[in-house]
Image (cartoon, rainbow, N blue to C red):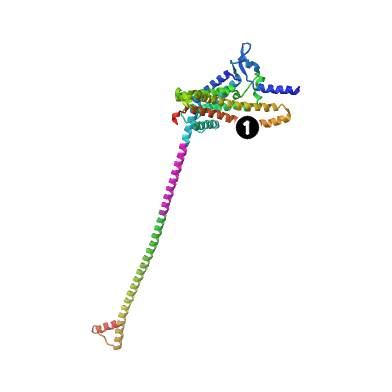
Amino acid sequence: MASEAKEFSSQEYVSHHLTNLTWGRLPDGSWGVAHSAEEAAQMGLLSIHLDSLLWSLGLGIVFLVLFGIAARRATAGVPGAFQNFVEVIVEFIDTTVGEIFTHTNKMVAPMALTIFVWVFLMNLMDLVPVDLVPKTMSLAGVEYQKIVPTTNVNITMGMAAAVFLLVLYYSFKRKGAGGFLGELAFHPFPKVFAPINFILEGVTLLAKPISLGLRLFGNLYAGEMVFILIALMYTGGILLAGFGGILHIAWALFHVLIITLQAFIFAVLSVVYLAQAHDVPDEH
Amino acid sequence: MFNLGTFLLQLVFFFVFVGICVKFIWPPAINAMRERQQRIAEGLENAEKADAALAESQQEAEKILQQARAEGQQIIDQARKQVSSMIEDAKTEARSEGERILEAARAEVAQESNRAREILRNDVATLAVVGAERILSVDIDRSKHSAMLEELVQEL
């Protein structure tokens, strides 16, 4: 039936958009790019999402180059427009971090800046029309292309895990192994219930990076999904396409807020977690 | 969905990017900004100081101007007073000079008339003697009658 065929193609369209360009060991034993979702799944542990990683790397380099140029050219004289733009962001991050993070640690503010701009740039890819890059790439022979790295849970969880490692590092460094473990074990119940405390606090501790990574992933994944579904409407006749156009503009405008907000939340929460890691109980 | 390689590589990227930012981007940017902030603050402070100095010197100038004006007025007043006193003096002098000249003229006139009277008196005495001689046809001894003649002259 016609409707069934259309439904199938819609489903295919969506799932095609949600498939990463996966690089790994092919069934025939050679290394290369998977040509179907099944092939990608078969690669198992020894594979990487080439598209997400390359976009992530590229956008990170864009950040480093842009801000690096501004930093190199930074003088105490009158700043130019680009200089000013970069400095507004640096100043904004510096103030925000200053309000949250009251300890001295020279890496926290730059880390927040890196997270904010990098995640923002990755999120920004969501505003590129969903078919533009994948279609262009497919003409060039690349079958799959997901250009928004933050819609890939591995990317967001990778960053969240990095933040978590920093949290663990500074917790041990500031409180000592005993202090940190004691904080986990002797709280909230008396010391006799140490195992229970440890489980409870362990969950609390682990919930931080997981919620951090999944929040960003969930927001961006949902946003991208809406864009893909709107893009589907363009194939449904002139009326549906017109309505889709309006929805597209509305969602894109709204999404500008979301991508900025999510980048900011990720950065701020990372700073908050690091601030907690630096809090020695005696200080209070 | 989960892909360990992607996860780990992104984790590594994170540390690399954050590390580069911490080392090479943040310090020069924030230092330049702080320095500029300080410069602007200094500039504003200096401007404030300059404003105060300007107001002060304006006040000073106003004071000096006022003083000069008052001094000028004083000099003009003095000059006016001097001029009027000089005119007054000249007037008084002229008046006294006139009076003096008048007095002298008067004295001269009186002297002149006295002299004329004297001459007239002598003439009259002579005339009287001549008349009397004619009448009496006798010589009048001038020496004899000099006393009487003197008396006559006195009476004239």
> Percent position (x, y) of residue A166?
50, 24
Q: Secondary structure beneath disc 1?
A: helix
Residue B61 shown in magenta: yes
Q: Is residue B4 visible?
A: yes
The part of the image, by quadrant, that contains residue A242 is: top right
Residue at image point 67% right, 23% down: A14
Picture quarter with the N terminus of chain A: top right
Residue A88 shown in magenta: no
Residue B136 or residue A105, whichever sits in front: A105
> Mark 1 sits on what residue?
A254
The three-letter code of the residue at mark 1 reads Phe
Above or below, comparing residue A252 to residue A134 in the picture: below
Q: Is residue A163 visible?
A: no
Magenta stretch: give its range: B41-70
Residue at image point 66% right, 22% down: A15
In-image side of A136 versus B60 (left or right): right
In-image side of A93 versus B84 (left or right): right
> Percent position (x, y) of residue A42?
63, 15
Chain of the residue displaying label 1: A
Residue B10 or residue A197, whichever sits in front: A197
**Crowd class of label 1 (few under 14; some 14 to 19; many from 20; radius 10 Å):** few
Q: Residue furthest top?
A: A29
Q: Residue furthest left?
A: B144
> Percent position (x, y) of residue A130?
65, 25
Picture quarter with the C terminus of chain A: top left
Residue at image point 72% right, 27% down: A236
Magenta span main SS: helix
